[in-house]
Image (spheres, rainbow, N blue to C red):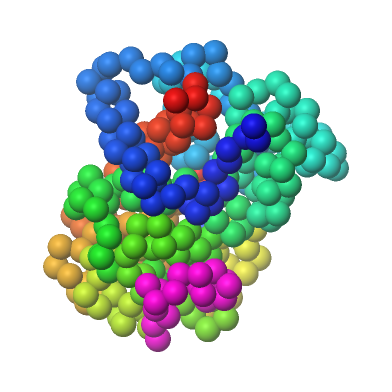
């Protein structure tokens, strides 16, 4: 049987994603109560990072350890991935020795090629197109704070980037309304937008997107790989900052999320990022719990 991969939220059904979040909440409870949970004893996860990471690396490595398994960090600098060995060949070799592969890279096609040639599950730890693991953590955080997100109104303000794309997929699977405000030329991928149907609304500015929102989300203006555009982007995105005025448009009990790392004073003010409405630390911690639930499903014994 071919391995099951997690390259996009759309690889799981709505029911599967809700069950995954429920399991993540239970896995978190067990950890907090000191109850050992080691269904992945003896399992090994290879982690390929072709871009930087703090949260993704620490959460997957800690998660594998807590589940009884082990994680192996690989970078292009000290493997043949950085010396031109085709990803297809790397996939065949690595997947013959481990139980799962996590990859963070640039082009999404690279992850798809890896998955196509891997005999073990592949997890997308971020590509230029998508960041599905972060959405699992964001959704767990929402479910813990507010219950099911179906029918809620979410505002995405800033760049139409990998996080925005994964929010579109989340709107599809969890059935919420998504108001997106991006500067001209930085809108999300048109094809992806279309798949979201009438749940997704492109707004003229940040205030419009935030109006009556239950959740306001943003991300850096220049993603990894766009460092040379940083100066220009600071100007282009200047009116897309999430600040007190923008949050005032949202519902009084609206939450604020950011996948981190954040640039205080750019895409979000320190006042909002560090406010009582902000759940950024819960989001970051939930990377650990929800990815443990994901690893258990993909790498664990068949149920
Ligand atoms: N949010 C996130 O993926 O963080 P890292 O880049 O630190 O992994
Ligand atoms: N959009 C950001 C997310 C970082 C977690 C990036 O791709 O750099």
Quadrant in which the C terminus appears = top left
Q: Does residue 173 belong to the magenta stretch?
A: no
Does residue 224 sit above or below 206 in this rendering? above
Does residue 297 sit above or below 98 in this rendering? below
Could you tell me which residue is drawn at 30 percent across and 81 percent down?
207
| Side (left or right) of 231 relative to 286 | right
Q: Give the camera-side residue of 256 and 234.
A: 256
Q: Give the camera-side residue of 68 and 15.
A: 15
Could you tell me which residue is drawn at 75 percent across and 39 percent down?
117
Could you tell me which residue is drawn at 24 percent across and 53 percent down?
148
Q: Position of residue 279 (x, y in %)?
A: 27, 51
Quadrant in which the N terminus appears = top right
Q: Give the camera-side residue of 233 and 50.
A: 50
Q: Position of residue 138 (x, y in %)?
A: 35, 50
Q: Position of residue 226 (x, y in %)?
A: 63, 63
The reply to whether residue 62 is visible in this rendering is: no
**Span colored in magenta:** 187-204
Could you tell me which residue is drawn at 53 percent across and 83 percent down?
184
| Side (left or right) of 153 relative to 112 | left
């Amino acid at each position: 049987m071919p391995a099951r991969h997690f390259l996009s939220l759309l690889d799981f059904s709505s029911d599967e994603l809700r069950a995954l979040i429920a399991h993540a909440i239970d896995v978190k409870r067990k950890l907090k109560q000191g109850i050992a949970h080691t269904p992945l004893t003896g399992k090994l996860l290879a982690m390929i990072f072709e871009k930087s990471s703090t949260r993704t690396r620490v959460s997957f490595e800690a998660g594998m350890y807590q589940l009884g398994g082990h994680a192996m960090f690989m970078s292009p600098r000290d493997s043949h991935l950085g010396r031109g060995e085709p990803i297809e060949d790397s996939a065949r070799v690595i997947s013959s020795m481990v139980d799962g592969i996590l990859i963070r890279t640039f082009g999404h096609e690279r992850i798809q090629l890896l998955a196509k040639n891997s005999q073990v599950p592949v997890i997308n730890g971020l590509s230029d197109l998508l960041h599905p693991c972060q959405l699992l953590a964001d959704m767990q955080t929402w479910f813990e704070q507010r219950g099911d997100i179906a029918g809620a109104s979410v505002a995405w303000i800033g760049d139409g980037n990998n996080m925005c794309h994964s929010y579109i997929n989340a709107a599809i699977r969890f059935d919420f309304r998504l108001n997106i405000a991006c500067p001209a030329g930085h809108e999300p991928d048109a094809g992806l937008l279309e798949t979201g149907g009438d749940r997704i609304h492109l707004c003229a500015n940040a205030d419009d997107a935030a109006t009556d929102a239950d959740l306001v989300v943003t991300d850096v203006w220049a993603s990894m790989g766009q460092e040379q555009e940083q100066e220009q982007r600071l100007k282009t995105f200047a009116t897309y900052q999430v600040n007190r005025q923008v949050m005032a448009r949202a519902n009084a009990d609206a939450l604020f999320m950011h996948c981190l790392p954040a640039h205080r004073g750019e895409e979000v003010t320190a006042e909002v990022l560090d406010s009582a409405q902000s759940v950024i630390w819960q989001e970051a911690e939930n990377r650990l719990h929800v990815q443990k639930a994901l690893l258990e499903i993909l790498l664990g014994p068949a149920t």
